[in-house]
Image (cartoon, rainbow, N blue to C red):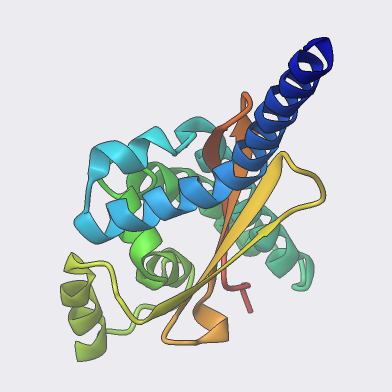
Amino acid sequence: MNFFKKTLGWMFLLLAVGTFVFCYLGSPYWAVYSIKQALTDRNQEVIDSYIDFDNLRTNLKNQLTNQVEMQFAEKQQKPINQVIQAFSYEAIDNLVDQYVTPEGIIDLFSSANKLQTIKKEFEPKEESTENANQTNTQKKFPSNVTWSLNYGDNTNQFFAIIKPNQKENDKIEISLVREGFFGWKVNNILLPFKFN
């Protein structure tokens, strides 16, 4: 009788541990699935619950600032370039604050169009009908995208890579970090471009 109770106790313990490990390791996949469904349904409330807006803005600004510094490091440091560089930093702050908002985050995830718009703010302006068509296609999250999911260097970091239309250059790499045991927040979006 005692042997039966001990065996039953060990079975419940193993079941509890197994369930915890399954939920612990599977939680980021569920988080990404929830984000995908919310993007399809344009459910802003659910998406916002998975976004760490403060860290996301900071990380995006750091990425863009590093790209600007690399761009100007390759050029001769004339006084005019220093002035342009200073204005670029201000433009980065304004653009990220403009696009990384509860209202704009769905479009930021939905395609590379918003990110390309940010890039073009630092390039010569060219008007084209293609840009207008891209703006009109952002109403819905595109269905012809592929998602690849994987852990980072540890179990507290996870990456979801979105490739619209199988285009490698347009891929968006989303970084999520663990909050508690089972919670996840998006804290960075690795940009799919570099300044030339």
Q: How many marks?
A: 0
* Residue positioned 39% across, 45% down in the render: 100
Quarter that holds the C terminus:
bottom right
In the picture, residue 84 is in which quadrant?
Answer: bottom right
Location of residue 57 in the rendering, given as x and y in whole percent from the top left corner: 51, 41
Q: Nearer the viewer, residue 132 or 137?
A: 137
Q: Is residue 6 above or below residue 124?
A: above
In the displayed orientation, state which residue is furthest to the top. 2
* Residue positioned 34% across, 43% down in the render: 47
Q: Is residue 61 visible?
A: no
In the picture, residue 193 is in which quadrant?
Answer: bottom right
* Residue positioned 38% across, 33% down in the render: 49
Q: Is residue 76 left or right of residue 187?
A: right
Q: Is residue 118 above or below residue 127?
A: above
Q: Nearer the viewer, residue 99 or 22?
A: 22
* Residue positioned 20% across, 76% down in the render: 137
Location of residue 112 in the rendering, given as x and y in whole percent from the top left corner: 42, 71
Q: Is residue 81 left or right of residue 36?
A: right
Quarter that holds the N terminus:
top right
Q: Is residue 16 above or below residue 99?
A: above
Q: Is residue 177 visible?
A: yes
Location of residue 6 in the rendering, given as x and y in whole percent from the top left corner: 80, 16
Location of residue 75 in the rendering, given as x and y in whole percent from the top left corner: 75, 73
